[in-house]
Image (spheres, rainbow, N blue to C red):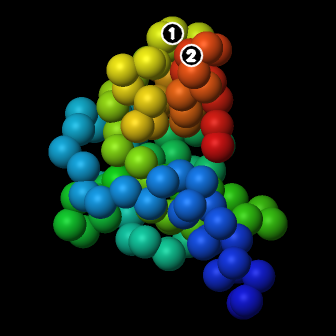
Amino acid sequence: MRGILINTAVLAIFLGAAPIAAADDVPGINDDAVLGAPCDSASRYIYGRGPSGEPLACVAFDGAGQWVQSMPLVGVREVGSPCVDESDGVAQSPDGLGLVCASDMGWQPGP
């Protein structure tokens, strides 16, 4: 249990544990996500919204998916497209991959 809590804390820092965000939802978003609850969409269409609208991501720890806080969603973006003005958010590719801004490389699959 301690390992899961540590992993969750580290990932929340990596994802930028953000406050509630008002952004464009992406296709396949799970409107019934609950922070800390199990999830099964950790490879594609990983984003959800919690009960208060907060952005969440389904991330796998040791094979088990769990909802964690996410940076704000900015919408659907192509892998490699520029992200300079959106570097404080996360996106989703048209085919459902979670994307993070990698500065000079643009949007890249992650986390």
Residue 40 in view in this figure: no
Instruction: Inspect the image, locate mark 2, and give the three-letter code of the amino acid beneath it.
Output: Gly
Q: Residue at x 73, y 89 (%)?
A: 2
Residue corresponding to mark 2: 106
Measure how far apart labels 1 and 2 are at the Cα level: 5 Å
Q: Residue at x 35, y 39 (%)?
A: 73
Q: Residue at x 57, y 21 (%)?
A: 103
Choose top left, top right, bottom left or bottom right for residue 108: top right
The residue nearer to you, when weighing 44 against 72, is 72
Q: Position of residue 27 (x, y in %)?
A: 36, 32
Residue corresponding to mark 1: 81
Local SS, label 1: loop
Pick out the residue farthest to the bottom: 1
Q: Position of residue 79 (x, y in %)?
A: 57, 15
Name above or below for residue 87 compared with residue 39: above
Choose top left, top right, bottom left or bottom right for residue 31: bottom left
Q: Are marks 1 and 2 in contact (CB under 8 Å)?
A: yes
Local SS, label 2: loop
Left or right for 23, reference 45: left
Name above or below for residue 18 compared with residue 62: above
Q: Position of residue 43 (x, y in %)?
A: 65, 43
Q: Residues within 10 Å of mark 2 (few under 14, many from 20)?
A: some
Residue 17 in view in this figure: yes
Q: Residue at x 38, y 64 (%)?
A: 33
Left or right for 17, reference 95: left
